[in-house]
Amino acid sequence: MAGDGPDPVTGVPSPSIATSLPPLMADPGGLRRALAAKGVTYQINYNADFLSSVSGGMRRGSVFNGRLELSVDADLEKLANWQGGSAHVSLFHIEGVGLSRRYVGNMMTVSNIEAIPHTRLFEAWLEQKFFDGKFSIRAGQMGVDSEHTSSSHASLFNNASFGWPAILGANLPSGGPAYPFSTPGIRAKYEPNDNNSVLVALFNGDPAQPGPADPQARNPHSMD
């Protein structure tokens, strides 16, 4: 998810097309602002790629990839007087055909949204912060690559080479708990200042049940 997160007053993320729309279209009925006042914000994003294989790879061809993203965040201190608590849920609806899978045959996908078309639960977790937010514990369904072993600037690039490392994707069972997968886990994070942090986490290392088929087909909705 790109951007700095929704504004706590208006509920509108930045950047967002909603900042350029009339109020009636950006926040119909004032629902978004009313939810934000209770600590609940949401984002709806759509990413799309039209890609072609023009040389090399397995064959020539063009594809369309699309991913609809829905995420909801809750400040539980505002919503339920839970001091330092927060919750997050995100879903992906993936569509189209992968250029790497169908035409190129490479290990690191050409598109960073490429996956078998399905509607997937990506993340659903609770987080508790302590010591003025310097220490936190998060538990639930998570993607390891949301916080670990990926560049914070990876989403700026179209291809997946700057995301989940190939050495992990090739050697962990089913490619490991990274996009489009997520698995149950727990992590602790310590942030002494804005420039440094230490994370320790435990995850289910195999996001799909064993079997001969593609791991994404064995766990099509990330609900195993």
Image (cartoon, grey):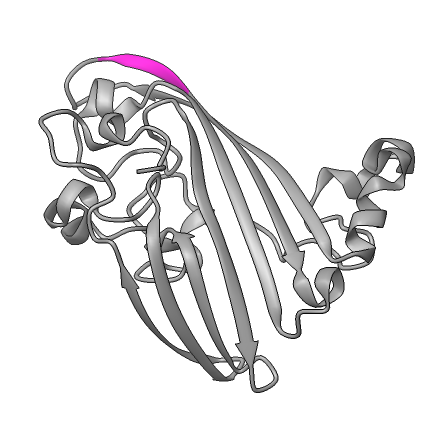
Q: Is residue 40 visible?
A: yes
**Bounds of the magenta segment:** 60-64
Dominant SS in magenta: strand
- Residue drawn at x 35%, y 46% as measured from the top left: 182
Residue 44 figure quarter: top right
Q: Is residue 1 visible?
A: no
- Vertical placement of residue 159 versus 148, above or below: above
- 100 or 87: nearer the viewer: 87
- Vertical placement of residue 62 versus 69, above or below: above
Residue 179 position within the rendered picture, expressed as x and y whole percent measured from the top left: 34, 43
Residue 28 position within the rendered picture, expressed as x and y whole percent measured from the top left: 86, 33
- Residue drawn at x 36%, y 37% as measured from the top left: 223
Is residue 22 covered in magenta? no
Quarter placement of the C terminus = top left
Residue 129 relative to residue 162: left or right: right
Residue 76 position within the rendered picture, expressed as x and y whole percent measured from the top left: 67, 63
Residue 122 position within the rendered picture, expressed as x and y whole percent measured from the top left: 43, 42
- Vertical placement of residue 149 versus 98, above or below: below
Residue 215 relative to residue 146: left or right: left
- 209 or 167: nearer the viewer: 209
Residue 189 figure quarter: bottom left
